[in-house]
Amino acid sequence: MGDQPRAPAAGLGRRLGSLGYEVLLLTAILFIGGWTFLFFARALDPALARPLLQLYLLALGAAYFVYCWTHGGQTLPMKTWRIRLETRSGGAITWRTGITRYLFAAAGIGLCGLGLAWAIFDRERQFLHDRLAGTKIVRCEA
C-alpha cells in the first residue's frame, strides 16, 4: 500500500474567514453559558463569582473546541470553510493535542492576538498555537 496523498495546507484567508465565523458561534455559546452560570451563581460572593465565571467560560470554550477537534477535526465554521485540523503527520487530533492547542491558542489570543499575528511571519503561514502544538489546518476535498 502506498502513502495517501497529504491534504494541502489551508490558506491564511480561508483560516481567517473560518475564524471570523468561529467568533460569532463562540460568542453565542459563551453568552448562553455565561447567562446560565450567572443564574445559578446568584448566591455566590461577587469576589468569587467573577474568577469562577472566567474559568467556567474558558473551560466551556475548551470543551467545545477540543470535542470538535477530536471528533472529526472540524468545528461547524471549519466544515463551512472546508478546512480540517490534523497533526503535522496527517493524523487525527488526540485529547492531549487538542487541549494543548487550545491552551496555546487562548494564551496567544490573550496576548493581543500575537499567536494569530505570528502567521504573517511564519514560513508556512501557521498560527503560533499550531506550530507549538504540532498541528496544522488543511483544506478538505469537496
Image (spheres, grey):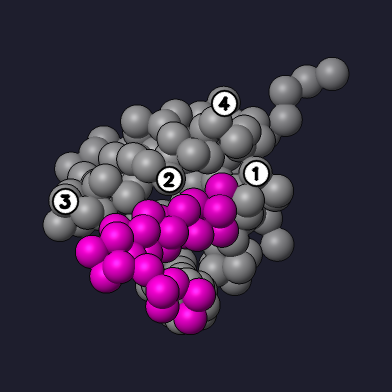
- Residue 102 is marked as 2
Q: Quadrant of residue 24?
A: bottom left
- Compute the Cα span from label 2 to label 1: 12 Å
Cβ–Cβ under 8 Å for marks 1 and 3: no
Q: Say which residue label 4 marks.
A: 89
Q: Which one is in front in this view, the residue at disc 3 or the one at disc 4?
A: 3
60 inside magenta stretch: yes
Nearest to the observer: residue 15 or residue 64 = 64
Q: From mark 2 to mark 4, how far is it between C-alphas?
A: 19 Å
Q: Nearer the viewer, mark 2 or mark 4?
A: 2
Between the C-alphas of marks 3 and 2, the distance is 14 Å
> x, y (%) of residue 81?
54, 67
Circle nearer the N terminus (3, 4) = 4
Q: Residues within 10 Å of mark 1 (few under 14, many from 20)?
A: some
Main structural element of the magenta stretch: helix, strand or loop?
A: helix
For residue 7, side relative to residue 48 (left or right): right
Looking at the rendered structure, the kind of residue marked 1 is: Thr
Q: Which residues are magenta?
A: 39-66
Q: Which kind of residue does numbered mark 3 sit on?
A: Leu
- The three-letter amino acid code for the residue at tag 2 is Tyr
- 111 on left or right of 9: left
Instruction: Report helix, strand or loop for mark 1.
Output: helix
Q: Position of residue 80 (x, y in %)?
A: 59, 71
Residue 25 coordinates in the image, percent (x, y): 49, 75
Q: Which residue is mark 1?
A: 70
Q: Is residue 46 above or below residue 48?
A: below
Q: Which residue is mark 3?
A: 111
The answer to the question of whether label 4 and label 1 lie on touching residues, with beta carbons closer than 8 A, is no
Q: Earlier in the sequence, mark 4 or mark 1?
A: 1
